[in-house]
Amino acid sequence: MSKNKWPIWIRDDLSAVSCTEKIKVMKENFDEISQLMQDAFEDGIIMEVSEKQIRDVLHHIIDQLENPYKKK
């Protein structure tokens, strides 16, 4: 996936999200997240933090995300 190319967003039932505004919000959110992660990664490298450790911590952050709207 290229830097500014995001996937076609799908629902749990595998149907595509087609609302232009929703797709725009997702693109903007993921562009921002990607840039923040890149900046944090580069800062860590400049500060001589292990590249592997930075990647591990970024993965850990993703793994800890919680869905507050999960159906019960």
Image (spheres, rainbow, N blue to C red):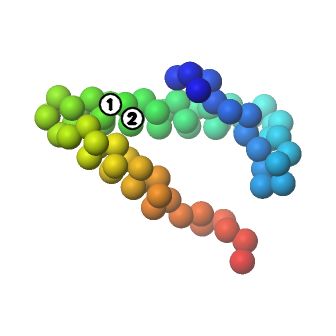
Placement of the C terminus among the 4 image quadrants = bottom right
Distance Cα–Cα, label 2 vs label 1: 5 Å
Secondary structure found at label 2: helix
- Can you say whether 17 is above or below 13 in the image? above
Badge 2 vs badge 1, beta-carbon distance below 8 Å? yes
Give the label on residue 36, or none: 2
- Can you say whether 61 is above or below 3 in the image? below
Left or right for 64, reference 69: left
- Can you say whether 49 is above or below 28 in the image? below
Give the label on residue 18, or none: none
Task: Residue 21 in the image: state x and y as whole percent.
Answer: 74, 34
Task: Residue 13 in the image: state x and y as whole percent.
Answer: 84, 54
- Residue at left offset 78%, top offset 50%: 11
- Residue at left offset 45%, top offset 61%: 64
Task: Residue 18 in the image: state x and y as whole percent.
Answer: 83, 36
Left or right for 52, reference 47: right
Secondary structure found at label 1: helix
- Residue at left offset 42%, top offset 30%: 35
Left or right for 54, reference 64: left
Residue placed farthest to the front in the image? 52
Residue marked by disc 1: 39
- Residue at left offset 22%, top offset 36%: 44
Q: On the image, which quarter does residue 16 sit in?
A: top right
Mark 1: amino acid? Asp
- Can you say whether 69 is above or below 27 in the image? below
